[in-house]
Amino acid sequence: MGRGHMPIGRRERAKQAKRERIMTAARELFLEHGVSGVTTQQIAHRADVAIGTLYLYASTKAELLIMVQNENFAAAIDVGLAAANAAAGQGALEQVVALIHPVVECVREHIENGRTYLQELAFGDPGEPYRQAGLALAARLEDGITGLLTRDEHIGAADAATLARVITAIIHISTTASVHMHRSDEVVLADIRDQIHATLAPHQRAA
């Protein structure tokens, strides 16, 4: 047997299986009914676990939502970073838009869930482990935008970091504000693109 690969015990496998069932049940029910239309008891029932067992993995419905959305958010960032790298040479604007495109689609897959997720990250307890993971993902997105902007020789590192925070704020407002709820993804993305263009324009004009 090779070193460094300890076999997973039966108890640990059982815990992983329960967590996967809970995640699957929560994901399905949140998509079907939205976070406000689902109870933790319904999730426990669909996952075939006792409600007390469910609370061992997440103590509130909000934490369950964050668990589910974190996985989706992480996958969207991965896709976006790959798309941004593929757009190398097209300019900072196009690369940033390529990065955020799947992120916006992820947040808007279910409008209520996406809004609640971002609000929980922004205003919830930052010490809670699942929120910490979500905030780390948000920082990864911001760092990714910063990295793309620093490829532009006319944008310094300090300005790139500030601009990245502005762009993430634009994404947050554009995907959570009530006035945008009934817009299509294409319209929201086009509006975000225009805002990013206006944000970067002073640097382009100075160049």
Image: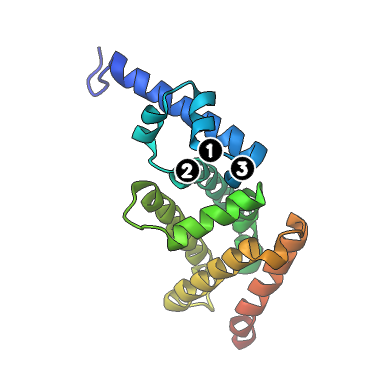
Disc 2 from disc 1: Cα separation? 7 Å
The vertical placement of 118 against 40, above or below, is below
5 with respect to 140 (left or right): left
Q: What residue does disc 3 label?
A: 37
Circle 2 packing at 10 Å, graded few (<14), some (14-19), many (20+), is: some
Does dot 3 land on a helix, a strand or a loop?
A: helix
The vertical placement of 72 against 164, above or below, is above
Disc 3 from disc 2: Cα separation? 11 Å
Q: Residue at x 39, y 39 (%)?
A: 58
Q: Residue at x 54, y 79 (%)?
A: 154
How many discs mark residues in the rendered view? 3
Which amino acid type is marked by label 1? Answer: Thr
Q: Quadrant of residue 172?
A: bottom right
Q: What residue does disc 1 label?
A: 39
Seen as rendered, the residue at the extreme top is: 1
Disc 1 from disc 3: Cα separation? 7 Å
Which amino acid type is marked by label 3? Answer: Gly
Q: Quadrant of residue 50?
A: top left
Which amino acid type is marked by label 2? Answer: Lys
Q: Residue at x 59, y 39 (%)?
A: 30
Q: Position of residue 68 (x, y in %)?
A: 51, 40
